[in-house]
């Protein structure tokens, strides 16, 4: 079983704040590609043709983009509610009305939207709730977490400290949430990494801050999203210190070519970060699509050169086994190795497209809407 541990779906806020948020998130990327001017602030007319960036992400498209290359399951993440940043009302909302949750789009219903999508696609989606202690207070966040797990049956929790302006090691704001997660025995994913979005606190994205949490809650399963990018060494060192901490490769893997991906795995080993706690993920619909991100890791040994190959069992576990252990669900190594053998020709064609008579298809336009 192959699992993508990090996906976004629906919209992550109400207009016009949502549009502003996405513009800040994506501006540098499109400037670096020449799609937006770099010598001045892009104006409305400069963004023409890029409006798809702030359209809601359709769950059916998400499923299709994964199924076509052999991904079995996708974690879909709620975005925690907030309305005190310059992006106004932030949080998962169903603007297109695809979830069946009644009433106008509401950032306080983010967990309900994600739970509804899991009920619609129980074999594909793994749903993660989100809460924010600075939104309606710590007690409200703890109660909402309990409701999301006990009533809505979501699988775990995703936290966004830097976006929501609280420190992950804050004893008053953060620890009560981690304590409730430990009591419920659920896995917790934390965005620890930078973001180009301006009204956020860079320090609170520093993965080293999770050391306090891992020490205080040694049995709580924690996962650092995006490998702590750009503090990847710090993230790996953190994981080397705590048996209960994992990482996902999402976003970072879009910035690495295949040889650099091999180097990332070697670096993990050098720093004592076991590959048994490294999880493959995409941050869909981020920089690159699953169709390129999956073959890049699955066939990573093609870029090993004269260096020792990554054992096939380790690769299989990174594609699903490690994240299954983090979730606390069953997973079969033998089955996944068989699956990888049968998918190899498909992945190989993506890495090295066979020559065709016609001109090659243009590459798909990336969305780059990670968080
Ligand atoms: Zn993300």
Image: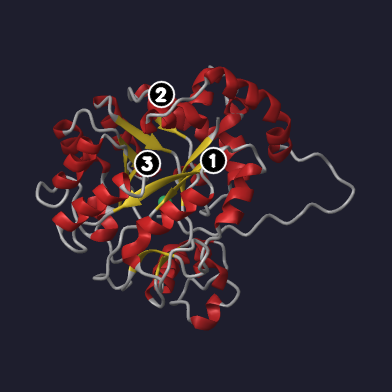
Separation of residues labelled 1 and 3 (CA atoms):
13 Å
Q: Tell me if 224 is positioned left or right of 5 in this view.
A: left
Label 3 environment density (alpha carbons within 10 Å; few <14, some 14–19, many ≥20): some
* Residue at 56% across, 62% down: 33
Task: Identify the residue position indicated by label 3 in the image.
Answer: 155
Q: Which mark is residue 276?
A: 2
Q: Tell me if 138 is positioned left or right of 38 in this view.
A: left
* Residue at 24% across, 71% down: 84
* Residue at 13% across, 48% down: 170
> As rendered, which of 91 and 282 lies closer to the eye?
91
Q: Earlier in the sequence, mark 1 or mark 2?
A: 1
Measured as percent of width and height from the top left, residue 38 is found at: 48, 71
Are the residues tagged 2 and 3 within 8 Å (C-beta)?
no
Q: Is residue 309 visible?
A: no
Task: Identify the residue position indicated by label 1 in the image.
Answer: 123
Label 1 environment density (alpha carbons within 10 Å; few <14, some 14–19, many ≥20): few
Q: Secondary structure at mark 3?
A: loop
In this view, 23 is above or below 7: below
């Amino acid at each position: 079983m192959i699992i993508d541990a990090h996906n976004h779906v629906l919209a992550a806020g109400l207009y016009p704040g949502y549009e502003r948020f996405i513009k800040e998130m994506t501006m540098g990327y499109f400037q670096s590609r020449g799609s937006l001017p770099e010598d001045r602030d892009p104006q409305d007319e400069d963004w023409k043709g890029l409006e798809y960036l702030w359209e809601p992400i359709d769950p059916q498209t998400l499923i299709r983009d994964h199924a076509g290359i052999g991904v079995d399951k996708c974690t879909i993440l709620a975005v925690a509610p907030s309305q005190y940043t310059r992006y106004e009302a932030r949080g998962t909302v169903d603007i297109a009305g695809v979830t069946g949750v009644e009433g106008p789009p509401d950032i306080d219903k983010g967990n309900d939207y994600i739970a509804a999508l899991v009920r619609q696609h129980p074999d594909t989606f793994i749903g993660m709730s989100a809460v924010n202690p600075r939104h309606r207070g710590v007690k409200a966040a703890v109660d909402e977490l309990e409701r999301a797990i006990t009533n809505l049956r979501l699988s775990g929790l995703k936290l966004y400290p830097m976006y929501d302006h609280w420190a992950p090691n804050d004893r008053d704001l953060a620890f009560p949430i981690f304590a409730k997660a430990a009591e419920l025995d659920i896995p917790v994913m934390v965005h620890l990494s930078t973001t180009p979005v301006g009204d956020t606190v860079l320090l609170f994205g520093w993965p080293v801050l999770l050391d306090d949490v891992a020490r205080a809650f040694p049995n709580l399963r924690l996962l650092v999203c995006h490998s702590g990018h750009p503090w990847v060494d710090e993230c790996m060192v953190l994981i080397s210190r705590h048996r209960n901490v994992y990482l996902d490769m999402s976003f970072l893997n879009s910035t690495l070519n295949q040889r650099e991906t091999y180097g990332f795995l070697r670096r993990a080993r050098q720093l004592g970060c076991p590959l048994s706690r490294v999880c493959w993920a995409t941050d869909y619909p981020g920089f690159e699509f699953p169709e390129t991100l999956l073959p890049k890791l699955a066939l990573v040994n093609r870029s090993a050169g004269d260096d020792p190959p990554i054992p096939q069992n380790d690769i299989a576990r990174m594609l699903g086994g490690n994240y299954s252990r983090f979730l606390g669900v069953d997973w079969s190594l033998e089955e996944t190795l068989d699956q990888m053998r049968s998918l190899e020709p498909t992945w190989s064609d993506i890495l090295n497209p066979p020559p065709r008579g016609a001109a090659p298809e243009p590459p798909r336009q990336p969305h780059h809407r990670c968080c």
